[in-house]
Amino acid sequence: MKHLSSKYLFLEFMSNTGSRKIGAILSIKKLYIIFIVAFILLGCGTNPLTGQRTMAFIPNSQLFAMSAEAHRDFINENTVVTGTPEAEMLSRVGWRLVEATQKWMAAQGRPNDIADFPWSFTLIQDNTINAWVMPGGKIVFYTGILPLTQNEDGIAVVMGHEIAHAVLNHGQQRMSASLLQQFGLAGLSIFMEGAGSSPELTAVTMTAFGVGSTLLGTLPFSRRNEDEADHLGLILMAIAGYNPYEAVSFWERMNALGGSSPPQWLSTHPSHPHRINNLRQSIPEAKRVAAEFGVHQPRSSH
Ligand SMILES: [Zn+2]
């Protein structure tokens, strides 16, 4: 990953703090240590959308570049479905939800936060019941989840959830946590030394973003992140004109899968009854917020 150079990160950091002059008179080594400490301090902030404290060590520009590369690798190694009604539906739902998300962000007073998100919606031919998102909104659905989503509203349930993860910067938190967890401070120094092409870092990137299908290889989003994504996802789908009741139906279908082994992306997730209950309780709020955006009836997609 050639764009993970220390120089690049350094310049970005310095331009953010406006301390170019200080940088010039310090030895590289001292600067390096200061950089790590400052990076950690800067990295622990508050998510403006949730008010929760979060970890964010990696500038989004950097994260998006890593995302794009990991996404490209994944696409090259898997079968992308294009031109089918399902693929077109995925793209249509994705862009409708992005439009709704932009309206919602503007209403939060943060219209520019997602302006540079390189959204994409890809359908992969694979029977795994799975969907995931990379930082910046690169969303992948596997065909295996389509029998469970069943219709356009069902797609919107999963899509809204994934878009919410992206908007709430959960991938950033997971990547930061993953780096600290697996490499400690050394993880951060790998970035700063520009050793980004190491297979270890690529592996962490892929793992942190939930790419791949091995159960043990996937670092879970926290339960809190899952609840946040469920809640915001429901609101976004309602603003986009989809029927929020379908979220309950979708999770009931997932629940009915019952005895068979749980899909990877669910295995670390909140229990189905917990989600169903929370989603059901959030439906009136989702409808009320949608009404504030002029959406009083869900569009019919059946
Ligand atoms: Zn999730």
Image (cartoon, rainbow, N blue to C red):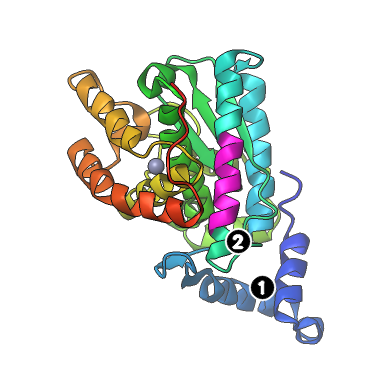
Predominant SS along the magenta part: helix
The stretch of residues the image draws in magenta is: 94-104
Mark sitting earlier along the chain (1/2): 1
Q: Is residue 200 visible?
A: no
Q: Quadrant of ligand 1?
A: top left
In x, y percent, where is residue 108?
A: 52, 66
- Which of the 4 quarters of the picture holds residue 69? top right
Under mark 2, the amino acid is Ser
Q: Residue at x 61, y 13 (%)?
A: 84
Q: Which residue is mark 1?
A: 32
In screen coordinates, is 178 left or right of 264?
Answer: right
Q: Secondary structure at mark 1?
A: helix
- Image height check: is 154 above or below 170? above
Q: Residues within 10 Å of mark 2 (few under 14, many from 20)?
A: some
Residue visible at 43% across and 30% down in the picture: 153
Determine whether label 1 and label 2 are within 8 Å by CB. Answer: yes
Q: Which residue is mark 2?
A: 189
